[in-house]
Amino acid sequence: MTQKEKILAFMREDAYKPLLIEELITVLDVPREEIGHFLSIIDELEADGRIIKTKKNRYGIPERMGLVTGRFQGNERGFGFVVPDDETIADVFIPLENANGAMHNDRVIARFTRAIIEGKRAEGEIIRILKRANETIVGTFESSKYFGFVVPDDRKISQDVFVPKDEFNGAKTGQKVVVKITRWPEARRNPEGKVVEVLGHKDDPGTDIVSIIKQFNLSEEFPEDVIKQAERISDTVPENEIQKRHDLRHLKIVTIDGEDAKDLDDAVSVERLENGNYRLGVHIADVSHYVTENSPLDKEAFKRATSVYLVDRVIPMLPKKLSNGICSLNPQVDRLTLSVFMEIDKTGKVVDYEIFDSVIKTRERMTYTNVTRILEEEDPELIERYKDLIDDFKLMKELALILRQKRIDRGSIDFDFPEAKIILDEKGKPVEVKKYEITISNKIIEEFMLICNETVAEHMFWANTPFVYRIHEEPDPEKIENFNKLIYNLGYHLKGIAKIHPKSLQQLLNKIKGKKEERIISTVMLRSLMKAKYSHENLGHFGLAAKYYCHFTSPIRRYPDLVIHRIIKENLSRGITPAREEYLKTFVQQAAKQSSDQEIAAQEAERETEDLKKAEYMQDKVGEVFEGVISSVTSFGMFVELENTIEGLVRVSSMEDDYYIYDDKHYSLIGENKKKIYKIGDEVKVKLVKADLATRQIDFVLVEEIENDGQLEDDKFYTIPETGLANKKAKVSTRPKKREKTKEKEKTKKRRKK
């Protein structure tokens, strides 16, 4: 146990009362020569919000003092929520007047002002801001005669940034800018700043994506020392390094990726053994050979933690010299790899495996499209072109389907939510939006990578060394109980909800496949589960029903993969010393936290660019009518998803045929008067009325329902949620009557004019 952990454990004891620093030194028996180090640890814990110093200079744990440490999640209307570091604590609502200058994503400490009452969230007040998240803000500049202001692109930052006239730095109205905060906001006072970069006019081509890149603090450029280190790396593999490794260049090894992929970090091979089993080889680029620990390349990779795949470009974790060059498993060239060979029987069980350093030379750079055309369409031209590999592809399909069936049988959950593929022209304008098709070749690579990741994770777990696992924790029983109540109303039921097994959820997905209620059940199920993340602890992967799991197969684009490659190689070659183990214990925690945080940022940036281009694609289609499916229902309206994955909002305020009440237990909108119900999964016709690039918002209005099964029969007794009124006694909407009165008034006015 580290000294930090000892201090925290001591303060968490039931008998502990907040102590002065001198008392802590005495009670914990800190040697005189270590007092300076002890004080620095206390400062670090306080700065991170893990302990807090009271006004009387006493130290304690926030949660023991009615406080909570976490991240402030802002809202465009000024209020927000504190998302606690402790995931067992629910989010805390922060009213506008209690935000006290906190901005979106700031690390804060909040005091509870109201406990959870009758299902309502706890409320709180920000009392301390530990770390500011927004030193710079991207937005649209507006100027007046004496001052200017920047309207943030991130709508979760509710306040405009005031800019003094002498800090415009050439910015003009309508331009996208980066503004540096010079004075943080206070109660009833906006933040102040100065323009440090002008990105271009908001309507100029390309400015939109650049603004998002800046908003999420992504960098397309690498520091000079990183570039210099990359340039010193040879473009070819030296012979002396080949001699140290298993030489696999004679094997039929291929990569299978998308047409646009340039960072090819995984390759596969397969053969049938004499005993009838399969020998699957997964060969992963040995990035750790080139990105050495604590080097400039490594520090920059740690900082980025992931490559970011925006709609029109990739922002790589590593310079292209590596990601597209010496580390990419390009065809017909020698490449250094870490190989995992697995012997798999006919049931999909791994009966034997080995992991070692290797050198490979891939035969072909295959694409998902071509492999699918070979296997599913038996394309004669492609079969002739790749005739030496056809049997291998057939064997890959055979093995992948076995592995997939085994995974499904054990309870691995497979959601079927469509992904979008956005086609841009040479100017970056979207010309087509369609569903990304998942083919047999995608499934081959997915299954091979999954089994490889599991095999490596289990191997390293039993090696008992520090490691970075990919975990997906068990869901909150309360959320599963609420989910079970929802599906009960739809005619389904889950068993064992106190400790749900993923197999129960997958069986439910199988039952609803192709049925009208599939969308609502799948959506709410996903919301009921935890989010996957990286961790130094092996807590299993609930969604995959896997006891051991890690990310091993993409070290070019994910930092956790790179870290565990180092640990695996070190463990294989010379073992890990006790001193080294202590260092790694701390480092893998840092790497897991950084990688999880950056993964979220990358996902948000990718989603922003996708939403932007979808809105841009729809701009010239205002007035057109589309068929879609209700994908989500909220108190303010319902989201409708079109066949091409584009999603827009139908606002309750636009639904003028009735007053609609939101039923949060059934995720539906219910008409007070006509009892019409709109719920997730219903098919509707909508007309596009607005596509706003600034907000990335697409607005629809209802035209008509395609299937009117939301209409309740007159003789059915139905209680309207929140009102408690039965349908025959329900309060009747006055809106239609008001509209009739208005029409009568207009007719009267016309008669008078005549």
Image (cartoon, rainbow, N blue to C red):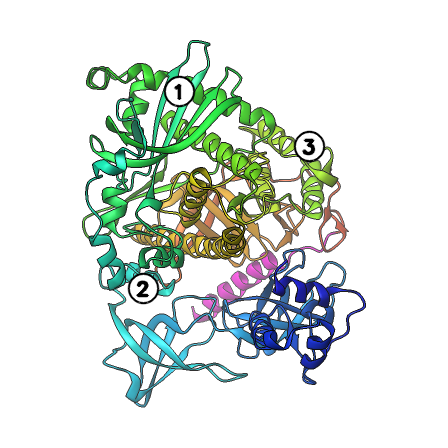
User: Dots 2 and 3: beta carbons under 8 Å?
Assistant: no
Instruction: Give residue 438's mark.
Output: none
Can residue 489 be seen from the camera position used here? Answer: no
Residue 315 in picture, x, y percent from top left: 30, 53
User: Dots 1 and 2: beta carbons under 8 Å?
Assistant: no
Image quarter hosting the C terminus: bottom left
| Position above or below: 740 against 53 | above
Q: Nearer the viewer, residue 423 or 81?
A: 81
Q: Is residue 226 left or right of residue 602?
A: left
Residue type at mark 1? Lys
* Residue 747 colored in magenta in the image: yes
- Label 1: element kind: helix
- Label 3: element kind: loop
Instruction: Give residue 492's mark.
Output: 3
Q: Magenta segment, which residues?
A: 730-754
Image point (73%, 55%), residue name: 723
In this view, the mark in front (1 or 3): 1
Instruction: Give residue 211's mark.
Output: 2
| Position above or below: 241 against 608 | above
Looking at this view, name the residue that lies furthest to the right: 15
Which tag, 1 or 3, sits closer to the chain's start?
A: 1
What residue does disc 1 label? 397
Q: Nearer the viewer, residue 669 or 625?
A: 669
Residue 736 in picture, x, y percent from top left: 59, 56
In this view, the mark in front (1 or 2): 1
- The answer for how far apart the CA atoms under marks 2 and 3 are is 46 Å
Q: Residue 88 lies in what quarter of the image?
A: bottom right
| Position above or below: 345 against 93 | above
User: Dots 1 and 3: beta carbons under 8 Å?
Assistant: no
Question: Main structural element of the magenta stretch: helix, strand or loop?
Answer: helix
